[in-house]
Amino acid sequence: MKKPNTYFHKGDLPDGVLAGAALVAIDSETMGLRLGRDPLCVVQLSAGDGDAHVVQLDRATYDAPNLKRLLTDPAVTKIFHYGRFDIAMFWLHLGVVTAPVYCTKIASKLARTYTDRHGLKDVTKELLGVDLSKAQQSSDWGQAKLSEDQVAYAASDVLYLHDLRTRLDEILAREGRDGLARACFEFLPHRAILDARGWEDMDIFAHS
């Protein structure tokens, strides 16, 4: 991978950014992990070319038409790690259903059955030999001015998702679980909306 370039944007993606990309890695930063309580603050994206775009959203309006257009573009597969949370946040705050999607955490759980360590740091370390820093994970993402360390951290969370997808797809195909993974990815936006609408802690498929 080339030396990464990180671009910071206020409010929305600029016109033309990521145009033509068929695969875009996406992550988000929020003020916490409680749906309906904690606001969406930042969305970071990468086309897998070594560049990352970090968007600090306007929380007063969440008016980000270019970002929303990309999230809903049927020609662009959005790659997440634990997309269930991000997709729910996008539905709550941006008012869009993000699709189609790929989730490296789901892929890891289906492919790497020899371990219970499926966090982004663990998967990236094993499959790519890259040791991600998580020092800024719990910092204040709602402040008016983000630090350079926060922006760099946000970028790092999307720069490796394309390569992780490639490695995980190899294992899924080898183990005959690629079709199952695709079915999970197709259902994921619906699972995220169930979370956002109040079924977050209930297994609706359970007998009881």
Image (cartoon, rainbow, N blue to C red):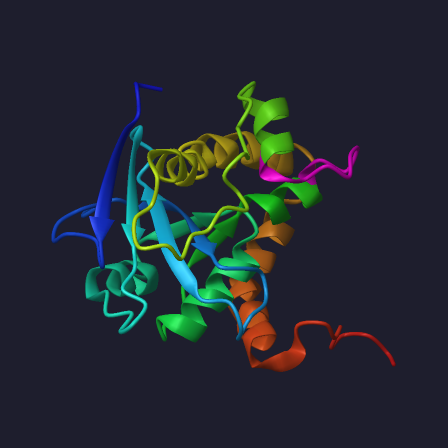
Q: Is residue 119 magenta?
A: yes
Query: Can you say whether 36 is above or below 71 in the image?
Result: below
| Point 66% across, 44% down: residue | 177
Q: Is residue 113 left or right of residue 179?
A: right
User: Could you tell me residue 65's position as x and y percent?
Assistant: 21, 66
Of helix, strand and loop, which mostly describes the magenta segment? Answer: loop
Nearer to me, 48 or 199: 199
State which quarter of the image contains the N terminus: top left
Determine the residue positioned at 30% across, 39% down.
Answer: 47
User: Residue 3 location, x and y as percent?
Assistant: 30, 19
Is-magenta flag for residue 91?
Answer: no
| Identity of the residue drawn at 49% across and 46% down | 139
Q: Is residue 176 visible?
A: no
Residue at the spot x=64%, y=40% of the render? 119
Considering only vertical position in the picture, is 82 above or below 48? Answer: below
Instruction: Indicate the quadrant where residue 108 lies.
Output: top right
Which x, y percent locates residue 185? Answer: 54, 57
Please provide percent x and percent y for residue 70: 27, 58
**Residue 148 falls left or right of residue 89:** left
Closer to the camera in the image, 175 or 195: 195
Above or below: residue 131 compared with residue 69? above
**Start-end of magenta stretch:** 111-120
Residue 30 visible in the snapshot: yes
